[in-house]
Amino acid sequence: MVSQFLEHVDRPIKKITKVDVTEFFDHLRSMTSERTQRRLSNVHINGYVMALKRFSKFLFHMHSIDLTVEHLSYLKVDTPEKQILSLQQIKSLFDACDNTKFGMRDKVMLALYYSCGLRRSEAIQVEIRDIDFTNNILFVRNGKGGKQRYVPFTDSTHQILTQYIDVGRKRLNRRNRLRNTLLIGKNGDRLKPQALQLRLNTLCKKAEIKQKVGLHTLRHSIATHLLMQDMSIYKISEFLGHSSLESTQIYTHIVENIGNKI
């Protein structure tokens, strides 16, 4: 996005003016999307606003160059407000998990939906063979639209998965029904989303989280947190398995609304 801006203004960064910035966004509003054959949406344009604001911050701190973007504001986006948990609330959910076989499984549930940002159906289909513990990579075998992707995970998630597979899952799967399915119930059967939602409700109660929290709330939360930590929106889009960057750009609107509350 920044490269498109620089290519459009076609002048040294130090000579870019407020007029250049304004003219570029006028140009964006007149553009037609190749994918939809319609004018660029406010969500799409907001992605450029965020990119230039971050670029301006980088230039000032690293090179003492003041790129004039203070006048830029995010365009109004009429979308249903997504529920987002704070980092402290996420920590409280993990802390609410005990060391029983169910608590170990609860941590895996949180790791898959929050730390790995999986969709509801993606997490319940994860198999042990999909986890590369050597490289900390999770293979999403059947994502939305049948698409596959690889999702990196942290050392903390590695530890959570290992403890569950080595201890908790063995206690749950005494009948040895499903040898490869990761998330299983007390009788060794594959868990359903409704059962996971009930477990999440229990954790929220323990963590004293009053708002309504769904499994997808965890995915929305990690996307927002990564964006607030300045991860590239392109990388976040790839991480979430979005087919369109515009789906990811919704989170720029959320970040603008919540500021630094998280």
Image (spheres, rainbow, N blue to C red):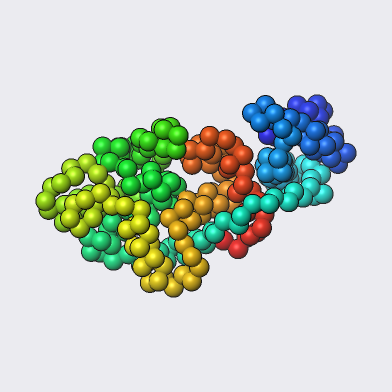
Q: Residue at x 74, y 30 (%)?
A: 32
Q: Residue furthest right?
A: 19
Q: Residue at x 22, y 41 (%)?
A: 180
Q: Is residue 108 above or below residue 22?
A: below
Asked if residue 166 shows in the view, the reply is yes
Q: Which quadrant of the structure image shows residue 25?
A: top right
Name the quadrant of the N terminus: top right
Residue placed most toward the observer, 11 or 132: 132
Q: Which quadrant of the structure image shows residue 141?
A: top left
Q: Residue at x 28, y 41 (%)?
A: 127
Q: Is residue 48 above or below residue 9?
A: below
Name the quadrant of the C terminus: bottom right
Q: Is residue 91 above or below residue 30?
A: below
Asked if residue 62 shows in the view, the reply is no
Q: Position of residue 239 (x, y in %)?
A: 48, 40
Q: Position of residue 46 (x, y in %)?
A: 70, 44
Q: Is residue 242 left or right of residue 183?
A: right
